[in-house]
Amino acid sequence: MFRQGLIFATVLLVADQISKWWILFVVDLPTARNIPLLELGPVGLDLTMVWNRGVTFGLLSGDGAWNHVLLAAVALAISGFLLRWLHKAENRLVAYALGAVIGGAIGNVIDRLRFGAVVDFVDVHAWGWHWYVFNVADAAIVLGVLALVYDALFQPQKRTTHSP
């Protein structure tokens, strides 16, 4: 399971970094700022450039010179804990979920160290309400966490028997 999770983390990390390179240097979204992609009635998908200096939903976005380094260090520490958990994963769902979270976290760490902020660019909106702008790494993290919650709540657990 460990190997599968690591391969999945690597694939997601590469996909995240390629998508960010494409957004920054091919599409040049920092100059364009917003590109509508899809409108289906009240539902839409746009490319919108956001430099996220905080964590999810822009929380903890400080102006300190070392804020991005501190957030990157925290994410790396959490990734280390998740790697240890991945080593003990008992099923494929947990291995892939942990791989998704690890790959996404490292993708965002790379951004923080390269740019001082995370490159976010996917803007989904419906009926005048916009979800937070996100990237491939963010989507991997959220889906990975949801899979872990699903596994914890709905997967049958092995029962251990203890001899008296």
Image (cartoon, rainbow, N blue to C red):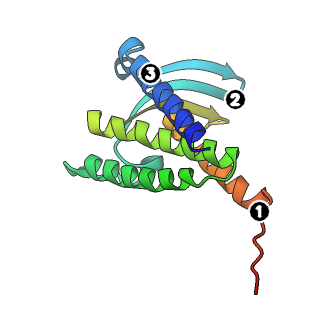
Residue position marked by numbered label 3 in the rendering: 18
Q: Indicate which disc, 2 or 1, sits on the residue closer to the N terminus.
A: 2
Q: Percent position (x, y) of residue 27?
A: 42, 14
Q: Nearer the viewer, residue 98 or 70?
A: 98
| Residue under numbered circle 1 | 157
Query: Where is mark 2, residue-wise?
Result: 42
Name above or below for residue 126 compared with residue 74.
above
- Disc 3 to disc 1: CB gap under 8 Å: no
x and y percentages locating residue 46 in the rendered image: 55, 24
Cα–Cα span, label 3 and label 2: 30 Å
Chain-order first, disc 3 or disc 1: 3
Q: How many marks?
A: 3
- The amino acid sitting under disc 3 is Ile
Mark 1: amino acid: Gln
Which quadrant of the figure has residue 119? top left
Q: Nearer the viewer, residue 88 or 125?
A: 88
Within 10 Å of the Cα at label 2, are there few (<14), some (14-19), or many (20+) other Cα atoms? few
